Image (cartoon, grey):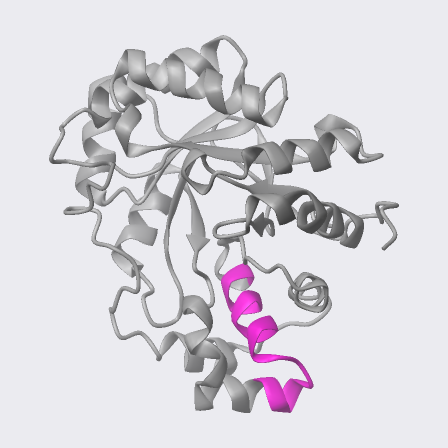
Amino acid sequence: MSTQPTTSTVPYLELGDGQRIPQLGLGVFQVPAEDTAEVVTRALATGYRAVDTAAAYRNEAGVGEAIRDSELDRGEVFVTTKLWNNSHGRDGALRAFERSLGRLGLDYVDLYLIHWPVPSRDLYVETWQALTEIQADGRARSIGVSNFNISHLERIIDATGQVPAVDQVELHPYFQQPELRRFHAERGIRTEAWSPLAQGQLLDDPAIRDIAQGLGRSPAQVVLRWHVQLGNVVIPKSVTPTRIEENFRIFDFELTDEQMKAISGLDKDERIGPDPEEFAVA
C-alpha cells in the first residue's frame, strides 16, 4: 500500500468560529484498535483530510499514530474526538480531554465534541462551559456537540453565549431531521451526519439503486452526494480499501433537482441509533 498522500479534492466548509472543516471525512466508529492506524493511513493516502474518532471508540491512539507517521503536515489533517458520557462536568471534562490528547499524541485537536447530552445527569451545560475553556487555551481549535436536539442547543447557547461550531447527529435519507437542520442553519451551526448510509440499509433501497444505475455510480456514492449537496459534513466509516476509495469519489458528479427530491422523499423519521433524550450509557 502506498502511503504517499495524494492531493485532496475535498471542499472545505466555513465554521461559525472562523475555522474550516473538510466536508468529507473518515469515521472510525467500530474500527478495531489494532486496525485503525492502517485504515487511517489508507484514507489519508486516498485524499481524506479529516478523521472522526472518540474516547468511546478506543482507537484514538491508532488515529494519532497514522497522522504522526504521515508525510502530511499536522495542519492538513482535521482531527475530531469526543467526550464520553462518564466524563460530564467541568473537572471530568478537562481530565477526559487531557487523556484523549495523550492517546492521540497530538498538541491539539481541530474539533472537540460532547458525545451525548445525557439530560438525565443534567451536566451538559457545565460540560459545555469546560469546552469553552479548552478552546480558549488553543488545545481545541473548534468545539461542538453531538446528538444534541434543539432544546439542548438552546440551553447551552443561552447559558454561555457560545454557539457550537458543529452538531454531529444521526442523519440519512430515512431520518432527515429537517427541523433540526433548519435550526442549525439559523444559528450558524454546521450539520455533520453520522451513520450517513443508515448502516447500509439504504444501499438496497429501490429509489437509490435506480438513481445509482442511471449515473453509473454506487448507491453509497449517491447517498453521500445527496448529503454533500444538502451542505452536510459527512463521515462514512469503512475498513475496506475499495470502499474507502469509492466513498471518496463523490465530487466529480452531481444529482439533479429531481434526484435530490426523490431521495428527500424517502424520509421515514426513523432512527437507527438511540434517542438523545434517553441515552445515558456510561
- Is residue 161 in view from this perspective? no
Q: Residue at x 59, y 19 (%)?
A: 108
> Residue extending furthest front?
34
The x, y position of residue 58, in whole percent, is: 48, 38
Q: Main secondary structure of the magenta part?
A: helix
Q: How many marks?
A: 0
Residue found 55% across the figure and 19% down from its top: 102
Residue 159 percent coordinates (x, y): 20, 20
Left or right: residue 99 versus residue 149 is right
Image x and y of residue 41, in percent: 74, 46
Vertical side of 126 occupied by 113: above or below: below
103 sits to left or right of 206? right
Q: Which residues are magenta?
A: 212-228
* Residue at point 81%, 34% (across, down): 72
**Quarter of the image with the C terminus in it:** top left
Q: Is residue 91 left or right of residue 66?
A: left
Asked whether 23 or 18 is in front, the reply is: 23
Q: Nearer the viewer, residue 50 or 254?
A: 50
